[in-house]
């Protein structure tokens, strides 16, 4: 296959993805699901290699540009949960564009790290995988435990009685635990319950993720009274090379961790790396989250092409594996080159689209966008996964609202992946599923 | 709406909704699917499939996984049970074996080129072993694939092409079939008691391997020793034998009327009053006969053997020492040594002149004629006539060509190191690829030896693609010793001749897109243009034939023999064995000559 055609496919994917990423709460994996269905129908005329490179473009574009809805519209996916708070702080300070650029700079830095590592990956990753492989279950369990244990009491300490203060202090902790446990049970139901039609099972996490992350955001926006102040684009950002390096370094640690380990998203990776490297500055935080998110999305997909590794991490790689199997080292280098070019394009698009977002938030009602998004999400869940999927999305929404309403971390919703995968890798998944009456 | 009520509504929705989901999920039927209907969008679906187990289960003790295959009439799918579930299956003795009807539920995992199903809950698997059909070997055919059958017969041969696989030759009155005992049966259910010559009853599934029907046994209990031996060879009068009997196993009784040793064994003339026939004992079989059972002129013997034909003459060829039974001793005056030719046995003069070059396969093309000649009178073997000795030549003559001695493997020992010997017939049991050549382990009934073929010799060897376990070869070579192990080292390509390819499918030319994981082990030829080369001592060539790209892995020992001018764009024709390495199909040429620039 001509390299230029492949790079062209990646650039086309980046362009499409950048535009779609601006739609709040629309995850690129949902779009890729539709692409898979289309590609399977056009299998005879659409080579798998072109689809794979188009998917690369999608993932690069999304990894870079989805900072826009996260910052300007407060719509996080499972990887940008941590961007929202500092991002909205910037937004309320009329500095939304700057936040977007900081996240984009982190993304560019993350991409540079991936490119620098690309010659080493074919040698290092097989060895790392063989060492880590037998220990995945307890590593994932440790990640879950860290998420839970790092919650802290958020009570006001103003209750009238000791009991009231105790309840107030423990409320968010219990809510976090409950969210994690309920999400985990939901994950087990999805893994073993078969509520989504078998013919669309490759999208069985779509309704859960929509309910856990997207719909609560929509509902929160519909109820909120926040008025976004007028924003303006700036010609420079307050970021010195040292802060950029710190942010990218921390983000790279988290992103690589997330890309390598199943069920760990970029947000969690960045969160872990942030703790490990003790980042406090909002700018460093935004840069690190941008880097972590991009390395998570693009790195996981890049690993799929590493010669001889045959590692499938992340939703995009799983979907790509249905259509295409990389067989030659040359494909890997084509993908590395295409990722670099697409990353550059995505950053330029981020700058351009961020200006568009400035215009949008100043002219269109926040709640109107949210309502339209809610309809789009429900329609997509229904179309792809049927009524069973809608039921799952409804229950997931209840679970996703718990952290919003009770003041715990949204990352606890990732129990939906962490719990079933950890149990499965430990060999206990079927046993627990049997306890739940799923078998 | 008050935020407080929303907080509790979310809690209620989460808990009650999840309870409803659990209820719905536990009550809903797992959807049943057919393998042929699976599509990529079903990845991660929890489904039920049913069918017949189409390959014996394989347990990987290192990884802990257990795999078997299921055929449902529309397609075949691999089922994987990971460590905990595999242990459960093995411990509970609920392991399905080939031919069993199975229904199970699991999670589908699909990739572009491969689909498998993960068995999550062994409790959800129903195994229904069908009642086996009692059959004769001759009635088995490929259309009965996966059908459970019950056979009774005698084990005529046992071989182990590689560790973990044991193949028995089972014969009944109608024919002979290979019975495969896979490793899992032995490992999971105790050792299967087998011994050549034993009468057994076998329950197994009909399978087809390289176009040949075989029976695959999955459980140790499916192979039982019989107290009474079923008749496998009818007693015939020698005069009744005809060309139509070629290939049949028969029993004859007669007296030894003549003896003719040749390089690979001994031929006897056997007569019973109705006719005479040649009894052929290959050297290895003769050597394994007890002294008292070795026929001499006049011995009345009962012989069980296959009827064969060589140059128009019928022969009885026993396979096992137990097939030759001396009923009464021969003439006391006859010498026990067989090395004399009965000139009186004029009925079969041509049959009495086997040479070392004759092989069983070469004889298959002989014209069929019956040998119902009057039996010669048994008599002591006359001594060789003095006139038959070569005359002494008074004039100098060129030095005689050294005669290469033919040996069975058990007769080759350390004292032979440095000599050049021939091995008439030996089977390849194992192959080890070395840095400068290939080492084959040869076996025959008497022993084993390493056949060391250096790469320069291998390059010119015509039958090199058939040098694989299961093949039989004739070898001439120098005897060497390396680290205490004897080896025979051919000096020229012609020194190794493949006598029997072991029923292996022939080398076939294929388009790249047509090569599938099921072709692993096959020797195939592909043609296409070289797109890329990489290497570090070894070489990896990527060949594109328009239908797809195939990785050609050239081992380091072969690289020096590759043709010149290899580079991107060059048209190549490559023959080699299909292997799967880390999930990728590749073709590995055995010699540089297998990579031809077009």
Image: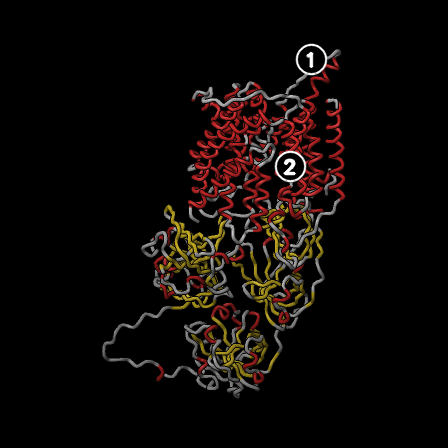
Identify the residue at the far front of this view: A363
Circle 1 sits in a helix, a strand or a loop, which is it?
loop
Q: What percent of the width, then of the height, locates residue A293?
A: 53, 31
B350 vs A119, nearest the viewer: A119
Give the residue at mark 2: A376
Report how many numbered discs are placed on residues in the image: 2
Residue A157's tag is 1
Classify 10 Å Cα crowding around label 2: few (below 14), some (14-19), many (20 and above). some
For the residues labelled 2 and 1, the Cα–Cα distance comes to 42 Å
- Residue B582 in view (yes/no): no
Chain under label 1?
A
* Lateral position of residue A278 relative to residue B449, left or right: right
Q: Is residue B114 visible?
A: yes
x and y, in percent, of residue A235 in the image: 45, 22
Image point 73% across, 35% down: which residue?
B18
Q: Left of B495 or right of it: where is A191?
A: right
Q: Quadrant of residue A218?
A: top right
């Amino acid at each position: 296959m001509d390299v230029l055609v492949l790079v062209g496919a990646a650039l086309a994917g980046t362009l499409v993805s950048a535009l779609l990423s601006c739609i709040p709460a629309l995850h690129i994996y949902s779009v890729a699901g539709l692409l898979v269905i289309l590609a399977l129908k056009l299998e005879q005329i659409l080579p798998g290699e072109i689809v794979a490179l188009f998917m690369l473009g999608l993932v690069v574009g999304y990894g870079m540009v989805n900072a826009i809805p996260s910052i300007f519209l407060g719509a996080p996916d499972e990887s940008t949960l941590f961007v929202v708070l500092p991002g909205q702080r910037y937004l309320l300070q009329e500095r939304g564009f700057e936040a977007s650029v900081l996240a984009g700079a982190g993304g560019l830095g993350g991409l540079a790290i991936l490119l620098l590592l690309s010659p080493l990956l074919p040698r290092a990753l097989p060895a790392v995988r063989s060492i880590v492989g037998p220990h995945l279950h307890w590593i994932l369990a440790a990640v879950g435990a860290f998420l839970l244990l790092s919650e802290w009491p958020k009570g006001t300490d103003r209750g009238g009685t000791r009991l009231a203060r105790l309840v107030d202090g423990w409320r968010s902790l219990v809510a976090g635990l409950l969210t994690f446990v309920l999400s985990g049970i939901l994950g087990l139901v999805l893994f073993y319950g078969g509520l989504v039609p078998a013919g669309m099972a490759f999208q069985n996490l779509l309704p859960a993720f929509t309910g856990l992350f997207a719909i609560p955001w929509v509902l929160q926006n519909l109820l909120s009274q926040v008025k976004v102040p007028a924003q303006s684009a700036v010609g420079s950002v307050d970021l010195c090379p040292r802060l950029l390096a710190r942010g990218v370094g921390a983000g790279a640690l988290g992103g690589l961790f997330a890309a390598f380990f199943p069920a760990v998203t970029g947000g969690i990776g960045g969160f872990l790396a942030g703790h490990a490297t003790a980042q406090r500055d909002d700018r460093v935080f935004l840069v690190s989250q941008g880097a972590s998110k991009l390395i998570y999305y693009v790195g996981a997909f890049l690993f799929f092409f590493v010669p001889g590794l045959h590692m499938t991490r992340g939703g995009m790689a799983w979907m790509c594996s249905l259509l295409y199997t990389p067989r030659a080292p040359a494909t890997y280098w084509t993908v590395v080159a295409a990722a670099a070019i697409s990353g550059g394009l995505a950053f330029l698009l981020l700058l351009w689209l961020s200006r568009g977002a400035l215009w949008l938030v100043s002219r269109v009602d926040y709640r109107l966008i949210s309502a339209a998004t809610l309809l789009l999400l429900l329609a997509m869940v229904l179309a792809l996964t049927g009524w069973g999927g809608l039921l799952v999305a409804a229950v997931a929404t209840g679970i996703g609202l718990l952290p919003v309403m009770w003041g715990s971390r949204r990352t606890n919703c990732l129990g939906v992946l962490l719990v079933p995968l950890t149990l499965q890798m430990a060999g206990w998944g079927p046993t627990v599923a049997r306890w739940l009456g799923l078998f | 709406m008050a935020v407080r009520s929303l907080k509790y509504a979310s809690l209620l929705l989460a808990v009650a909704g999840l309870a409803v989901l659990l209820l719905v999920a536990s009550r809903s039927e797992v959807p049943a699917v057919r393998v042929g209907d699976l599509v990529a969008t079903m990845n991660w679906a929890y489904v039920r499939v049913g069918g017949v187990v189409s390959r014996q289960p394989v347990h990987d003790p290192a990884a802990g996984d257990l795999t078997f295959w299921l055929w449902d009439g529309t397609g075949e799918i691999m089922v994987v049970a990971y460590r905990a579930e595999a242990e459960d299956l093995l411990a509970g003795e609920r392991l399905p074996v080939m031919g069993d009807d199975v229904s199970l539920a699991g999670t589908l995992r699909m990739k572009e080129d491969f689909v498998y199903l993960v068995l999550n809950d062994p409790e959800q698997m129903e195994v229904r072993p069908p009642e086996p059909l009692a059959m004769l070997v001759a009635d088995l055919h490929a259309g009965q694939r996966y059908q459970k059958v019950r056979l009774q017969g005698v084990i005529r041969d046992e071989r182990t092409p590689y560790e973990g696989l044991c193949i028995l030759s089972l014969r009944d009155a109608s024919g002979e079939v290979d019975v495969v005992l896979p490793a899992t049966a032995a490992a999971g259910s105790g050792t299967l008691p087998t011994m050549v010559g034993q009468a057994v009853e076998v329950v197994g599934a009909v399978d087809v391997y390289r176009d040949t029907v075989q029976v695959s046994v999955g459980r140790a209990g499916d192979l039982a020793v019989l107290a009474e031996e079923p008749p496998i060879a009818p007693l015939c009068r020698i005069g009744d034998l005809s060309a139509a009997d070629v290939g049949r196993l028969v029993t004859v009784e007669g007296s030894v009327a003549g003896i003719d040793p040749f390089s690979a064994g001994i031929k006897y003339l056997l007569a019973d009053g109705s006719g005479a026939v040649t009894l052929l004992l290959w050297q290895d079989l003769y050597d394994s006969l007890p002294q008292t059972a070795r026929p001499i002129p006049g011995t009345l013997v009962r012989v069980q053997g296959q009827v064969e034909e060589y140059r128009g003459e019928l022969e009885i060829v026993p396979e096992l020492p137990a097939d030759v039974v001396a009923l009464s001793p021969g003439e006391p005056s006859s010498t026990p040594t067989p090395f004399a030719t009965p000139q009186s046995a004029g009925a079969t003069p041509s049959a009495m002149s086997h040479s070392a070059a004759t092989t069983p396969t070469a004889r298959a093309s002989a014209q069929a004629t019956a040998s119902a000649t009057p039996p010669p009178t048994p008599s002591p073997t006359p001594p060789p006539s003095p006139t038959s000795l070569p005359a002494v030549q008074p004039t100098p003559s060129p030095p005689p060509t050294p005669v290469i001695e033919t040996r069975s493997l058990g007769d080759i020992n350390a004292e032979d190191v440095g000599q050049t010997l021939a091995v008439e017939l030996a089977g390849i049991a194992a192959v080890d690829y070395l840095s400068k050549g290939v080492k084959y382990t040869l076996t025959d009934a008497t022993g084993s030896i390493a056949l060391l073929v250096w790469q320069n010799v291998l390059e010119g060897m015509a039958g090199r693609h058939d040098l694989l376990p299961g093949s039989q070869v004739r070898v001439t070579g120098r005897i060497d010793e390396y680290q205490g192990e004897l080896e025979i080292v051919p000096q020229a390509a012609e020194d190794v001749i493949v006598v029997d390819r072991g029923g292996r499918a022939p080398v076939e030319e294929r388009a790249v897109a047509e090569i599938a994981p099921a072709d692993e082990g096959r020797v195939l030829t592909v043609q296409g243009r070289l797109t890329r080369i990489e290497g570090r001592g070894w070489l990896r060539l990527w060949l594109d034939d328009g239908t797809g790209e195939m990785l050609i892995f050239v081992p380091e020992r072969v690289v020096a023999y590759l043709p010149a001018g290899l580079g991107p764009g060059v048209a190549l024709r490559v023959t080699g064995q299909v292997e799967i390495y880390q999930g990728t199909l590749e073709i590995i040429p055995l010699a540089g000559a297998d990579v031809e620039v077009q």
